[in-house]
Image (tube, rainbow, N blue to C red):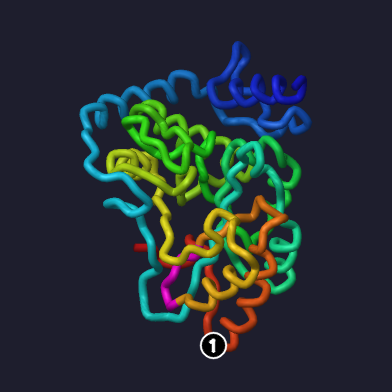
Amino acid sequence: MKHLFLWTIIVSAVLFGGPGGPLPLFAADSSAVFHKSINNEYASLRNMLVDRFGNGAPKHWGPVVKGVKTRLAGDDKVIALTFDACGSPRGKGFDAALIGFLERERIPATLFVSGLWIEANQELFRRLSANPLFEIANHGYRHRPASVTGQHAYGIPGTGNVGEVVDEIEQNARLIENVTGKRPAFYRSGTAYYDEVAVEIAAALGQQVAGYSLLGDAGATFSAQQVRDALLAAKQGDIAIFHMNHPESGTAAGVMAAVPELRKRGFRFARLSDVTVE
């Protein structure tokens, strides 16, 4: 509890500044600081977006709404493997076998990490973000569905208004940037559910919303055989969604079984930032 309390103080200071300006993201690293205090800048940005989108009335809710990008453009036999790290009470783990396989086989991938997962895996996150095989993407500060009206998905309460959507997206984007030195280009909400107003807010924050066209492990509930079969059904241009935070699942074994066969079929793998997403 003491550790979590200290972390909350540090993160709050990093995101919103303190009496002496922003503090390091992690207590042990005095070099990881923002270049300036963002108190007023963040508040101005948030207020501007609340004014701009506050009267929006969404008509749609789900994983595919207007503005969500679900496929790779072009005719090349390319697949994007994306892995979510959610950070819920039962989802703070790390699938070392899965990531180790990707590293050994030199398979690029996009890793969507939440602020909750970063909090629980600070040094591990540093290591992953330093590996050029992997692109770090935004999975939300508190892994919440992206709604301006408080919609739920899979029993998880969504953000309740425009300001909360901004906080969910922007706070995690800044958290990631503070560690990696690079602002994430892609965002996927907790549960990958959105309304179209929330997607517009993400775009205004410079975040492309990345959905998926291939359900790889169904929230880490698939068996290894189901994961293998799902991935072997991939077509060119698919964005496949898996999870990297459930080492007890069948995800690693299924991916390891499918990838060699996909390579034999002439497929290659890419990070989302390496291709055009549509």
Q: Judge whether residue 29 is colored magenta.
A: no
Q: Nearer the viewer, residue 249 or 264?
A: 249
Up-down: is 166 above or below 223?
A: above
Q: Nearer the viewer, residue 162 or 183?
A: 162
Q: In the image, what residue type sits under mark 1?
A: Arg
Location of residue 194 in the rendering, given as x and y in whole percent from the top left corner: 36, 44
Q: Nearer the viewer, residue 142 or 128?
A: 142
State the count of labels.
Answer: 1
- Seen as rendered, the residue at the extreme top is 19
Residue 45 visible at all: no
Location of residue 55 in the rendering, given as x and y in whole percent from the top left corner: 21, 28
Residue at image location 67% in from the left, 52% down from the top:
246
Quadrant that contains the N terminus: top right
Residue at image location 22% in from the left, 42% down from the top:
59
Up-down: is 266 above or below 255?
A: below
Q: Judge whether residue 237 is colored magenta.
A: yes
Location of residue 170 in the rendering, given as x and y in whole percent from the top left corner: 46, 35
Highlighted magenta segment, given as a residue range: 235-240
Quadrant for residue 12, please give it: top right
Quadrant for residue 149, please give it: top left
Up-down: is 271 above or below 245?
A: below
Left or right placement of residue 169 versus residue 54 in this view: right
Residue 106 visible at all: yes
Residue at image location 60% in from the left, 84% down from the top:
261
Residue at image location 69% in from the left, 46% down from the top:
125
Left or right placement of residue 145 versus residue 126 in this view: left
Location of residue 92 in the rendering, given as x and y in whole percent from the top left corner: 68, 42
Quadrant that contains the C terminus: bottom left
Magenta segment main secondary structure: loop
Left or right placement of residue 198 versus residue 175 in this view: left
Q: Which residue is mark 1?
A: 265
